[in-house]
Amino acid sequence: MATKRLRCNRCGKKLYGAKSYYLVRARVTSEPTELSFSEEELSEDHDAELRRLAEETSGRDAEALEEEVFVDLDYFLCVSCKKAYVKEVRKGPE
């Protein structure tokens, strides 16, 4: 992003030339449930399942598939929006 076009992602205020502003980096990842396998499951032939998954995902956009499990986001915030953002995050869901 060009510095001169930099704006607060929350309120839209121009940040270019601002005394200070903030960057929030968020990593959104899929968190799998705990995996456990029986000896029987470990000894099975998994080729058919791998072929099924390959067929299911064939033709799908690679970026869309990646975003199902991982996304990196950068947000720029002005001073007042940073304060509100931190307050909201600390408060958590109602």
Image (tube, rainbow, N blue to C red):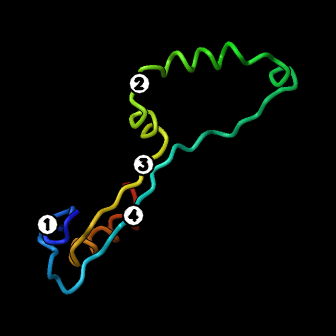
Q: Which residue is mark 1?
A: 5
Image location (x, y in percent) of residue 52: 59, 14
- Tell me if label 2 and label 4 are in contact, CB under 8 Å: no
Q: Nearest the camera: 70 or 11?
A: 70
User: Which mark is in front, 3 or 1?
Assistant: 1
Q: CA distance from mark 4 to mark 3?
A: 11 Å
Image location (x, y in percent) of residue 70: 47, 45
Q: Residue 65: which quarter of the image?
A: top left
**Secondary element at tag 3:** strand
Q: Reading the chain from its start, which is encountered first: label 1 or label 4?
A: 1
Q: What residue lies at 79% left-to-right and 29% top-to-bottom? A: 37
The amino acid at mark 4 is Arg
Q: CA distance from mark 1 to mark 4?
A: 19 Å
In which quadrant of the rendered image does the N terminus lie?
Answer: bottom left
Give the label on residue 66, or none.
none
Give the label on residue 25, or none.
4
